[in-house]
Image (tube, rainbow, N blue to C red):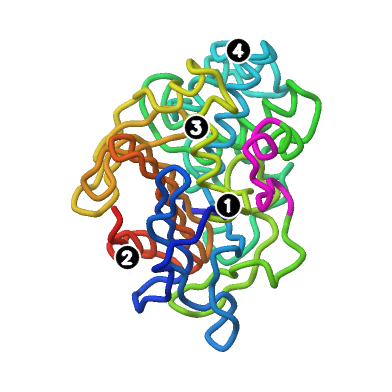
Amino acid sequence: MPSERQDPQRPHDAQERPSAWSGTALVVRGDEVLEEVSQGPAAGEDGPRCTPGLRSQAGSISKLVVSVVVLRLVEQRLLDLDVPVSRWLAGTPQGWAGITPRHLLGQTSGLGHWGDVPGLPGSLLVDPPARDDLVRMIIDAPLVADPGDAWRYSGPGFLVAALVVEAAVGAAYGEVADELVLRPAGMRGTTSGRHPTDLAEVALGHRDGELLPLLEGFTHLPGTGDLWTTAGDLVRLSQALRAGVLLGERGAERLWTPYAVVPGAPAGGPVVPQAYGFGTFLGTVKGHRARINPGDNPGYQSLLAHLPEEDLDVVVLANDEAPAVDAALRSLTAV
């Protein structure tokens, strides 16, 4: 299972730079690209190199998209943040009676992370179980806390949120995300729930420089690792949220208002999470106050961050594993 740690104008200095990461990094202020770096292999050492237009898996940045979808449906009065999810999902255990969409988006549902689900394969190089099987495993897994009691990062919780969306709307989550988020934001290179067929347009994942198999199963887990996207499209998402294209002011503020403190947040690196809103960490990037959406899947690591005081959008889509995002951020000079 994914560990989930966590074409605007081109700048004149876009170039390949030697560094210990592979992929694309982008720093944008408004319509101006301040820095764009693409480097490393897109498909093995002897294959093509990474370019800005290649699509990558965005991992848990999909949690931001789920959060926006849920909040749009709240605005449309199709969902309520404080109604138990059992209202929409049949067969949930009694212990789930207190879990609401608010808990899911704020990571206080009491559901554990992938390692807390008994029976999941331990290897990160195998496809996850089929969706229905995985949902049953999540439902059968014991809660790690009472709903609302404590913050605990949960990839399964966002899969449950996507299932609530499907039940409320009566359509596949990927279709709802496309209608409510991707198309309005102008994210033409982004898909939810669709595995890429043209690998020439994809930056394939690597581990320590070695090409990994492209696992299709992660694409079919709605809301948690199902997003394929480009750096430019992630900037469009961030800017569309701030421009009121996707949510009203109250809905957008819910993403960025601290809902829970992140316990034991690591210090010392360029990305420091301190609190959590809805689908979004709040903290610092290279010492600057930031809204932070990180992600990783096997072979990939990603980051979307907005630095409000500097009015900067920062994106890293790396197709080799950790410490890819940290290395990319340290190499950037515009932030």
196 or 102: nearer the viewer: 196
Q: Closer to the camera: disc 3 or disc 1?
A: 3
Front disc: 2 or 4: 2
- Quadrant of the rendered structure where residue 259 is? top left
Task: Look at the picture and state if 227 lies above or below 282.
Answer: below
Q: Which mark is residue 80?
A: 4
Tell me which residue sits at (51%, 19%) in the image.
Answer: 251
Which callout, 3 or 4, points to the residue nearer the camera? 4
Q: Position of residue 282 (x, y in %)?
A: 33, 34
Q: Earlier in the sequence, mark 3 or mark 1?
A: 3
Residue type at numbered disc 3: Leu
Residue 164 falls inside the magenta stretch: no
Describe the element under mark 3 as helix, strand or loop: loop
What residue is shown at x 67% (from left), y 10% (from top)? 77
In this rendering, the label closer to the viewer, 4 or 1: 4
Residue 175 placement: quadrant? top right
Of mark 2 and mark 3, the one earlier in the sequence is: 3
Q: Position of residue 58 (x, y in %)?
A: 54, 52
Q: Identify the residue at image location x=59%, y=18%.
A: 94
Query: Please, what is the dominant secondary structure of the magenta stretch?
Result: loop
- What amino acid type is highlighted by mark number 4? Asp
The residue wearing badge 1 is 120
Q: Which residues are magenta?
A: 180-194
In primary-sequence order, the first of circles 4 and 1 is 4
Rendered image: mark on residue 327: 2
Asked if labels 1 and 3 touch by Cβ distance under 8 angstroms, the answer is no
Judged from the image, the secondary structure of the residue bearing numbered disc 4 is loop
| Mark 2 or mark 1, whichever is nearer to me | 2
